[in-house]
Image: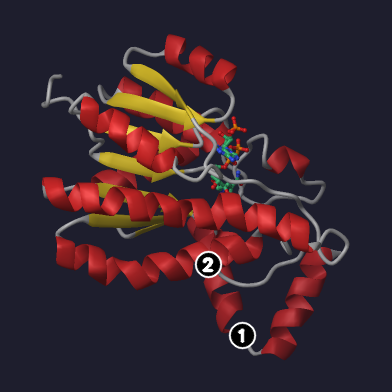
Amino acid sequence: MDQSIKHVWIIGASSGIGAALAKKYDQNGWRVTASARNAETLDDLASSGHKISSLVMDVQDAGAFDHAIAQFNQTGSLPDLVIFSAATYRPGGLDVLTHKDANNHMATNYLAAVGLIEAITPEFTKRGHGHLAIIASLSGYCGLPNAALYGPTKAALINLCETLKPDYDQLGLKLSLINPGFVKTPMTDKNSFSMPFLLSPEQAADKISTGLARGKFEIAFPWPLSISLKILQKMPYALYFKLTKRLAS
Ligand SMILES: NC(=O)c1ccc[n+]([C@@H]2O[C@H](COP(=O)([O-])OP(=O)(O)OC[C@H]3O[C@@H](n4cnc5c(N)ncnc54)[C@H](OP(=O)(O)O)[C@@H]3O)[C@@H](O)[C@H]2O)c1
């Protein structure tokens, strides 16, 4: 294994932002391991690139991360960078909120990231370096219409990354939090509302890879939406709900 070639593991790489990131890192000369459940799409992705290999996994499977890491260790190819991009999304408010669906969203979007952190951190620590990037969302900044199942999982990821950043610093490891706005992917194709500042997956992958190369903690984009939501988050509730009600209509 050529140790001078950097290795990125992208979890949630069969479509959308994850697939665009896989192609971007491949073009930049990295070795890419692409993970998701859909083996066929991953194989298509692998054959479209130079150094992309697929590693099929369901992030909800207990032991999936340990199994993958054991495979990396066997070949002496523990990734330099790991990007967690897997997520599920069902738009809606009270109309879609059930314990079963909330549990499924939490399991894929949040608890799987916890499983990844638990599995990868000791490996990075043993080796002495490593960069973990978690994709959350601008919708995790505050409660928004149509995000009853999804928004809380992203808020939890943001809070977790803020909590763990000093621990990662102390270990000499890098942690990044990625908060995209709207990106045109199979996920947002489910939305029937208008999506301001919609980006392509390639534009998102550019912003993410540039931010990660700079070692940024938070990579939030596009900035007009990110700033608007930060301001919304700080508003008194009377004004806040006036605005979010408008977004819902
Ligand atoms: N698109 C946006 O506007 C937007 C905005 C903010 C944040 N984000 C975040 O960006 C990330 C990528 O989203 P996207 O828009 O690119 O969506 P996407 O095209 O639907 O991609 C989601 C990826 O997650 C994988 N995945 C889902 N469940 C999985 C499971 N149980 N095990 C393994 N992989 C699983 C999917 O692959 P399989 O189905 O093959 O498993 C797919 O590769 C997500 O974290 C999303 O929340 C997206």
Task: Give the quarter of the image for residue 33.
Answer: top left
Q: Residue at x 37, y 34 (%)?
A: 68
Q: Residue at x 45, y 39 (%)?
A: 64
- The quadrant the N terminus occupies is top left
Quick one: label 1, few (<14), some, or many (20+) residues within 10 Å?
few
Q: Kindly state the secondary structure of the residue where label 1 is placed.
A: loop
- The quadrant the C terminus occupies is bottom right
Q: Position of residue 234 (x, y in %)?
A: 56, 83
Q: Taking 184 as reference, is 234 above or below it?
A: below
At label 2, the amino acid type is Ala
Q: Residue at x 62, y 45 (%)?
A: 198
Q: Which residue is mark 2?
A: 156
At label 1, the amino acid type is Met
For this view, does 142 lie left or right of residue 178? right
For this view, does 189 lie left or right of residue 10? right
Disc 2 under 8 Å from ligand 1? The reply is: no
Q: Earlier in the sequence, mark 2 or mark 1?
A: 2
Can residue 231 be spotted in the picture? yes
For this view, does 220 lie left or right of residue 155? left
Q: Residue at x 27, y 53 (%)?
A: 121
Give whichever of 76, 153 is nearer the camera: 76
Asked if the residue under mark 1 is in contact with the one under mark 2, i.e. CB atoms within 8 Å, the reply is no
Give whichever of 85, 54 is nearer the camera: 54
Q: CA distance from mark 2 to mark 1?
A: 21 Å
Q: Which residue is mark 1?
A: 235
Q: Taking 188 as reference, is 163 above or below it?
A: below
Q: Taking 183 as reference, is 16 above or below it?
A: above
